[in-house]
Amino acid sequence: MKISALITGKAVYTIPAETSVATLVEKLASLKVGALVVSPDGIRITGIVSERDIVAALPMHLHELGKLHVRDIMTVNVTTCTPNSTVADLMMIMTERRIRHVPVVNDAGDLVSIISIGDVVKSHVSELDSERLALVDYVQNPR
């Protein structure tokens, strides 16, 4: 299955790099998401920031947490995919790189959407269930 089937109508939220970590935490909580794409304009990707980035920054920056900005903790080497990428390919990438969110970009590299590990797992389970039902039908109704 292609990623394009999973992103139809799916919102992608962005945040500027200059935003404070406090505001970042509030936005993650209010949107009920685990990551935001860092972008100055909602099109170009300059990074991604997730709950993991916040937790990883805490030990070194706990004493200056109020002074931190998204740019101080974001991941700058962002793994992306395209709408033509497959769910199987993305599952492998997410597993190998131990990442849970992948921005989706068009051919020009512009941000289109975002895929989470939850989206990928849900799609994979649905695919497996469809195969199971087809096999049960085949076994119960031989032609």
Image: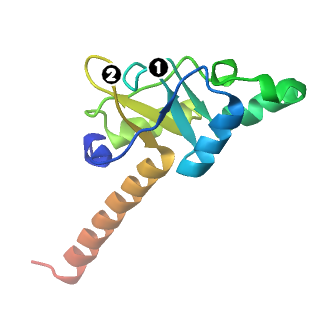
Identify the residue position indicated by label 2 in the image: 110
Q: Residue at x 28, y 76 (%)?
A: 136
| Amino acid bearing label 2 | Asp
Q: CA distance from mark 1 to mark 2?
A: 12 Å
Q: Say which quarter of the image contains residue 113.
A: top left
Q: Secondary structure at mark 1?
A: loop
Q: Nearer the viewer, residue 128 or 141?
A: 128
Looking at the image, residue 138 lies above or below residue 51: below
Looking at the image, residue 86 lies above or below residue 39: below
Q: Residue at x 31, y 38 (%)?
A: 86
| Amino acid bearing label 1 | Pro
Q: Secondary structure at mark 2?
A: loop
Q: Nearer the viewer, residue 134 or 104?
A: 104
Q: Residue at x 29, y 48 (%)?
A: 9
Task: Assign the C terminus to one quadrant of the image.
Answer: bottom left
Q: Residue at x 49, y 51 (%)?
A: 118
State the count of labels: 2
Task: Please report whichever mark, 1 or 2, sits nearer to the chain's N-terminal start.
Answer: 1
Residue 23 percent across, percent down from the top left: 65, 36
Q: Residue furthest left?
A: 143
Looking at the image, residue 88 lies above or below residue 103: below
Identify the residue position indicated by label 1 in the image: 40
